[in-house]
Image: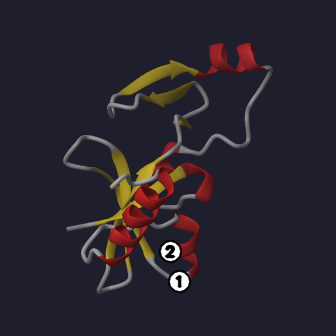
Amino acid sequence: MSISFKQLAAVAVIGLAVVPGIAQAESFSKLAGQNYAVGKLTKSKAGAYGWVVSNGSKQFFCRMDASLAYVSKKEMVSFTTSGRMIKVDRATFEARIGGPDPSIPQWSDLQAGRVKPADVGSCTPVR
């Protein structure tokens, strides 16, 4: 008996649909639209920056998607994928890109949980 690729794919889709307890990622925009509260910036166990978003009974960890943030008139920070924060000279950076970039968030806003959907990556349930 030979199983075709289509049959194997169908079995996999059905299997994943009926397996209970699999963590489903949510989008930050969807959670914010459902009045989830955003906590202060924190780090996950793996060292990634992000926010705990909750509605009282459910909690999600939403990873930070921003790679740069303004700290002051002279300083910026850059974030590596491993969670390291690197200081950047703002004047040098802005001279290279041609001026300030309004899409780059303020570090104080990120720390306080005042985030825009563009600054937030995927959200996974907190266990």
Near-viewer residue (116 or 124): 124
Q: Position of residue 105 (x, y in %)?
A: 60, 45
Q: Position of residue 28 (x, y in %)?
A: 52, 65
- The residue identified by callout 2 is 31
Q: Is residue 32 left or right of residue 87?
A: right
Choose top left, top right, bottom left or bottom right for residue 98.
top right
Q: Crowding at label 1, few (<14), some or many (≥20) Cα neighbours within 10 Å?
A: few
Instruction: Kindly identify the amino acid type of the residue bearing the numbered disc 1.
Output: Gln
Determine the residue positioned at 31% across, 74% down. Answer: 59
Determine the residue positioned at 51% across, 20% down. Answer: 88
Image: 6 above or below 125: above
Tag 1, which secondary structure?
loop
- The residue identified by callout 1 is 34
Q: Crowding at label 2, few (<14), some or many (≥20) Cα neighbours within 10 Å?
A: some
Instruction: Kindly identify the amino acid type of the residue bearing the numbered disc 2.
Output: Leu
- Residue at the bottom extreme of this rendering: 57
Q: CA distance from mark 1 to mark 2?
A: 5 Å
Determine the residue positioned at 31% across, 67% down. Answer: 23
Q: Position of residue 125 (x, y in %)?
A: 31, 68
Give the quadrant of the C terminus: bottom left
